[in-house]
């Protein structure tokens, strides 16, 4: 059964940045979009680039390896060369604790 797991503090991830967190062996990219936190798989569906290291523009991240683009709020692929979405995870903030449902 899925549960929420604490992964970071809000002050650890300033607006417009991302960080990779590991939860139960999964690498998850955690983004701060204007004070709202979002989590998707850290691995690009093209050839596995680390999305947490990509360029962030609003709610879009560009994979640093080949330029595939994803919406960090939905996991939807927005631009090639990736052809499939990444998994999105539910996020909640309790006080200043950021928790991801896995």
Image: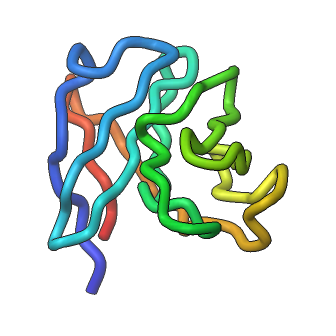
Q: Residue at x 23, y 14 (%)?
A: 11
Identify the residue at horizontal 29%, vertical 60% (top origin): 27
Please tell me which residue lies in front, 40 or 100. 40
Question: Is 41 in front, or is 89?
Answer: 41
> Residue 14 lies in what quarter of the image?
top left
Percent of width and height locating residue 28: 35, 55
* Percent coordinates x, y for residue 4 in the rendering: 24, 60
- Judging depth in this view, the residue of 28 and 62 nearest the camera is 62
Query: Which image quadrant for residue 42?
Result: bottom left
- Can you say whether 41 is above or below 53 in the image? below
Residue at point 51%, 16% (across, down): 16
- In the picture, the quarter occupied by the C terminus is bottom left
Name the quadrant of the N terminus. bottom left
Q: Is residue 64 left or right of residue 30?
A: right
Which percent across, then down, holds residue 13? 31, 21
Name the foreground residue: 13 vs 81: 81
Q: Is residue 31 left or right of residue 60?
A: left
- Above or below, comparing residue 90 to residue 21 in the picture: below
Residue 40 position (above or below residue 52): below
Residue 63 drawn at (x, y percent): 59, 44
């Amino acid at each position: 059964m899925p549960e929420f797991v604490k992964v970071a503090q809000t002050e650890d991830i300033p607006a417009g940045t991302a960080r990779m967190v590991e939860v139960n062996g999964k690498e998850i990219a955690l983004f701060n979009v204007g004070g709202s936190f979002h989590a998707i798989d850290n691995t690009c569906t093209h050839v596995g680039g680390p999305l947490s290291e990509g360029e962030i523009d609003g709610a879009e991240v560009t994979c640093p390896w080949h330029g595939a683009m994803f919406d960090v709020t939905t996991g939807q692929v927005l631009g090639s060369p990736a052809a499939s979405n990444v998994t999105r995870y539910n996020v909640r903030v309790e006080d200043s604790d950021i928790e991801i449902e896995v």
